Amino acid sequence: MGSWMHAILVVGAGFAGAVHARELAEHGWRVDVIDRRTHIAGNAYDEVDATGVRRHTYGPHLFHTSNERVMVWLRRFSAFVPYEHRVSALVLRLERCLPLPVNRTTINAVFGQSLGSADEVRAFLSRIAVSHPAPRNAGEYLESRIGRELTDLFFRPYTRKMWALDLEQMPASVVQRIPIREDDEDRYFPGDRHQCLPAGGYAELIARILDHPAIRISLGTPFEKRMSRGYAACFTSMAIDEYFDQALGPLPYRSLRFHHRTEPARYALGGTMQVNFTDASIYTRQSDWSLLPGHVVRATGCKTVTLEEPCADTDNNMERYYPVKTADGGPQALYERYRALAAGEPSLHFIGRCGTYRYLDMDQVINQSLQNVRAWLGLRDDADEQRAAS
Ligand code: UDP
């Protein structure tokens, strides 16, 4: 590693690290980026496999945002193709796949109703809803919106598999990621103005973000504390508890094991790219990469379908994918104690999903990174300027 004072060390070549590196490089800094993996792009990494299909190595990454600043920034590096994500949930009891988010079609099928309008759906939902005037957790929130049967069917076993926690142990924010619809809307991210994928994949997008003469990348390079010596600052996307050798105890994360299956190219379960399994089996969902635009790179007659099996990070080689939030705030409180430790090292900055221990989407990571760099550089943030102008 170099050791010039006008250089910065960025740990992790995922979205958080790449955005930091690029912005710092464009503002005159030399940047060394290291990553312990042998590829860039972090968990957004994708690759074309033997069936000719581009698959997302660490699970589906479906870009969506209403943040114009983020979209404009990304478009500097890649074209984007429109893709509106739809999910179906396999309900074994009914032997069919139903739309998720829960919408009019879902409700009519589950309850054998023929509700014709959003008003009728609203009235029906208010009849089956359970009163929880101030929901304290994901279970109470869902029951207060869609009643017990839909909660138990679509959310209870899935959440248990995903987090190894009951809905009552989780905060509402985790399930509020998914809308509840009274109409026929079946898109997973209906509220977002931009729903699209980088035309050449995420690995190519991030390679272009990192492609700057002042950025040097070292892959297969695990972080060691001595490496940050001599740098003006270190921005790290590593897990904050890992940096401190878990001195205050481990922060919990969920991980995923991926099971790839080769299938004939013709067949598609549910007809949607993603199918969620509502039952208590070990898998949460499957992704059929061939149904994403531009993802059949070579036609081979076959395709890869990937199933996800959630597990603890401790059971998967410490691969940390999801910070765990609980209704009682335990992990969040532990994170705050780590944050206080980090405040003692002013040139060290934790970034991204694992560094800031937040369940962030890609656009939020990019936005957080842009804000963070600009604050560090002492620049006025674009978002502030937009607010001031409006
Ligand atoms: N969820 C569920 N059933 C589903 C889909 C989601 O219970 O069929 C819950 C589950 O707790 C999940 C959360 O909603 O972790 C957020 O789902 P999302 O699809 O946003 O998860 P991600 O794509 O981030 O893994």
Image (cartoon, helix red, strand yellow):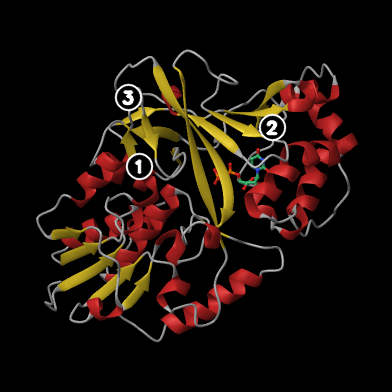
Q: Are marks 2 and 1 in contact (CB under 8 Å)?
A: no
Query: Percent x, y for residue 220?
Result: 25, 59
Q: Secondary structure at mark 1?
A: helix
Q: If you read the primary sequence from the N terminus, does the residue marked by circle 3 or circle 2 appear first? A: 3
Q: Quadrant of residue 299?
A: top left
Please give left or right for residue 28 compared with residue 167 in the image: left
User: Residue 109, position in %: x, y?
Assistant: 78, 21
User: Distance from label 3 to label 2 (Cα)?
Assistant: 36 Å
Crowding at dot 3, Cα within 10 Å, few <14 / some 14-19 / many 20+, comes out as some
The image shows residue 292, relative to residue 349, as above or below, that is: above
Residue wearing tag 1: 71
Residue depicted at 39% across the width and 34% down the height: 55
- Disc number at residue 52? 3
User: In what element is the residue under mark 3?
Assistant: loop
Say what secondary structure mark 2 lies in: loop
| Front position in the image: 361 or 241 | 241
**Splitting the image into four quadrants, where does ligand 1 fall?**
top right
Could you tell me which residue is drawn at 29 percent across and 42 percent down?
203
Image spot of residue 155 (x, y percent): 72, 42
Q: Amino acid at mark 3?
A: Gly
Query: Which residue is disc 2 drawn over?
Result: 181
- Name the amino acid type tagged 1: Met
Question: Considering depth in this image, is 114 or 151 the residue closer to the camera?
Answer: 151
Q: Is residue 190 visible?
A: no
